[in-house]
Image (spheres, helix red, strand yellow):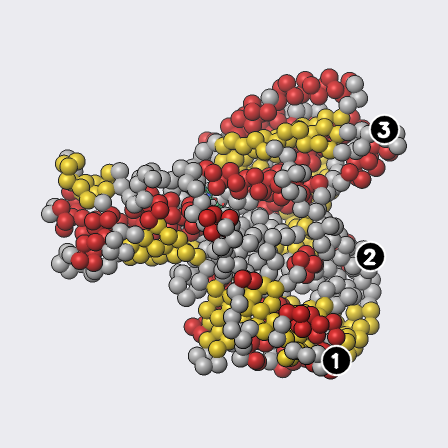
Amino acid sequence: METVAVVGKPVKRKEDPRFIQGLGRYLDDIVLPRMAYLALVRSPYAHARVRAIRTDAALAIPGVLAVITGEDLEKAGLAWMPTLAGDRQMVLATGKVLFQYQEVAAVVAETREAAYDGAHAVEVEYEPLPVVVDPFAALRPDAPVLREDREQKTNHIWHWEVGDREGTEAALRSAEVVVKQDVRFQRVHPAPLEPCGCIADYNRGTGRLTLYVTSQAPHAHRTLLSMVAGIPEHLIRVVSPDVGGGFGNKVPVYPGYVCAVVASLKLGRPVKWVETRTENLTTTHFARDYHMTAEIAATRDGRVRALRVKTIADHGAFDAQANPSRYPAGLFSICTGSYDFPVAFAEVDAVYTNKAPGGVAYRCSFRVTEASYLIERTMDVLAAELGMDPAELRRKNFVRPEQFPYRSALGWTYDSGNYAAALDLALEMIGYADLRREQAEKRRRGELMGIGISSFTEIVGAGPSHSFDIAGIKMFDSCEIRVHPTGKVLARLGTRHQGQGHETTFAQVIAHELGVPVEDVIVEEGDTDTAPYGLGTYASRSTPTAGGAAALAGRRVREKARKIAAHLLECGEDDLEWVDGRFQVRGAPGRSVGMKEVAFAAYTNPPPGVEPGLEAVFYYDPPNLTFPFGTYVCVVDIDKGTSEVKVRRFVAVDDCGTVINPMIVEGQIHGGLTEGYGIAFMQEIAYDENGNCLSGNFTEYLVPTAVEAPRWETARTVTPSPHHPIGAKGVGESPNVGSPAAFVNAVVDALSPLGVRHIDMPITREKVWRILRAHGITG
Ligand code: CDP
């Protein structure tokens, strides 16, 4: 293995030998002595008063140790917990339930089976209440008020707006062309392979609580637990073991965690709670559910002049989004996308309904997916209105390379970009001109073929502490490096990967900075007793934040190493230069030392007046976010007989600045595109009018596998971030953010000869069949 220039190499994933041999250690693999199990009693009703809860029959079941109700929690002041969005959420129902499968009681037992038997034996008397599932209906004056605990007696939660309302209105009024489109991003679910769970282990002897938990943000969870439960923070240790996918689902604190903690405190035993697949899909947090309207003002020759966006955000029963505090609608104001809009205005109104709470950033930097889908869909609507090629319309309106750093009409400063380069490469790879010719030919024959483009821009790396905090905690991140006497390295970070490969990529960054082989660096994350404080892994923030911390901690180690190297080489520090991963005396290439010799000297022969040891920690507060981007092009053919949409080709050109590991980046793109495919064609967390969730398992909520997924063709351009220590931008979420619009634009393009201008996702075969049938095309 090369010792230098390891950034940019497709180093094999260090974590894979344990994952592919079944040697990972996930939450449910952990079994502690005297461990009890917890199961939750859940409401069958979406809205009902809880008249009585009878626990005698449950307590009589052999092995049942305790039943906890909302009334019990009320006595401890824990019946409600604060959400990250500044709302509050019931831990166990007190008075009434507000969504189907809401947590009503917890049963703790010697075995998992006894806990479930106990949960079935708890008798709950409900008085059903009128249900509201439609967010627009929830806003009507005659709608039943769902949250009686609030002072405000409506279902409206908050209003948020940004931009120039009057200027945008004026531009729309005087525009040559205006298009307006309603676009819904349906409720979907991150659906990680491993559901959420925890083991709370309170030791009465030491007074310490260890919480093993499927957590994307262990330090934040420790602080919040301390603040909510009143346990001193130094007596809490949060351990996030191997995590089988998170995608935003493992950022919030869930009632199951609080119940397990309460049960462990009560029993003085470890208590495990692991949710089922149905519990995961129906109660731990959903994503999206944004009902948007976009208006674009443009000139007749296709120059955009203004953007206005109005959105209703359905938050379900509690506003339990996990957004940075200052941004209730997340980073939705990136909705001007890759385009140079002179003026824009966006507003969002959040609403309660009788549905599960959430609004998490599912592989998304806080509502960026919704924003990107909206603008990329609406740009196609504008292209159709103008009779213009959608690629040409995009090119004409891109923010140009010389405009960076670019300040958008809604207030973001984009760091760098070259949107036309990504578009050109994608069009060339797919053979755009030929495809358009083929399409024209096919249209003459009545065949349905479509080409969809999405030239998205992203905003990732929350974030600079001047604007980004969660519950007051600034969103920096951290890395601590310890170089052992033999030159081997242990690095710990405040992030927590869930399969993204940090043990490899951060080892690459550190190896690069220290000039050591990548296999000599071990990376650990997820234990609050050992890792430096950080805000965790979600929203593609790890590379922009902890990746920066890793590079800068490495440079800090090097600063000290330089003093030791000067001592070893008997020269002044200023006489040294860093060449190919070694300290070398300027002008004397034969006289050099590497980190291995320096590390040994740090412990055996430190220079006089220099502390022994070789360690550093860096808390990195990035100056700005990073703005990755790309162009995706999708080609579809629609079978008029079966209504099947076949994705013939999909080209993805991504730009995430400096690439640390091209193989891992490629894997991230494949995974995210497959998720985007599922969202575009298969997935919706749907409810009937009584608030029954219709998508509570994987036969109803479909997850694409390699069988369904198209073949992905990937490529990249490289436009480094000017402010990131190694020029890297985040990438994990780009394919999920950018791809839904490419799929939908392709299908709408295929159906445009029938007058179709928009179709809401998921584009199921039934939806296509209904459109074809309405035009007498299919039976
Ligand atoms: O926060 P999260 O890890 O989910 O997202 P990310 O920062 O976009 O990184 C996803 C994976 O891709 C990590 O292993 C990164 O180190 C890697 N990556 C890379 O190799 N080069 C980049 N420019 C960006 C990410």
Which numbered disc covers residue 689? 2
Q: Is residue 409 visible?
A: no
Mark 3 lies on residue: 777
- How far across and how far down the image is residue 717, in percent? 48, 31
- How far across and how far down the image is residue 371, in percent? 62, 44
Q: CA distance from mark 2 to mark 3?
A: 32 Å
Q: Earlier in the sequence, mark 1 or mark 3?
A: 1
Nearest to the eye among marks 2 and 3: give it.
3
Q: Earlier in the sequence, mark 1 or mark 2?
A: 1
- How far across and how far down the image is residue 591, in percent? 15, 40
| Amino acid carrying mark 2 in the image | Glu
- Tell me what residue is drawn at x 51 percent, y 42 percent: 731
Q: Is residue 105 toward the left or the right of residue 417 in the image?
A: right
- Locate the C terminus and report the quarter of the image it occupies: top right
Mark 1 lies on residue: 57
- Tell me what residue is drawn at x 15 percent, y 60 percent: 609
The answer to which of 773 and 138 lies nearer the viewer is 773
The picture quadrant where one finds residue 449 is top right
- In the rendered image, the vertical position of residue 635 relative to residue 287, given as above or below: above
Give yes or no for contact between labels 2 and 3 (Cβ–Cβ under 8 Å): no
In terms of secondary structure, where does tag 2 sit? loop
The answer to which of 473 and 223 lies nearer the viewer is 223
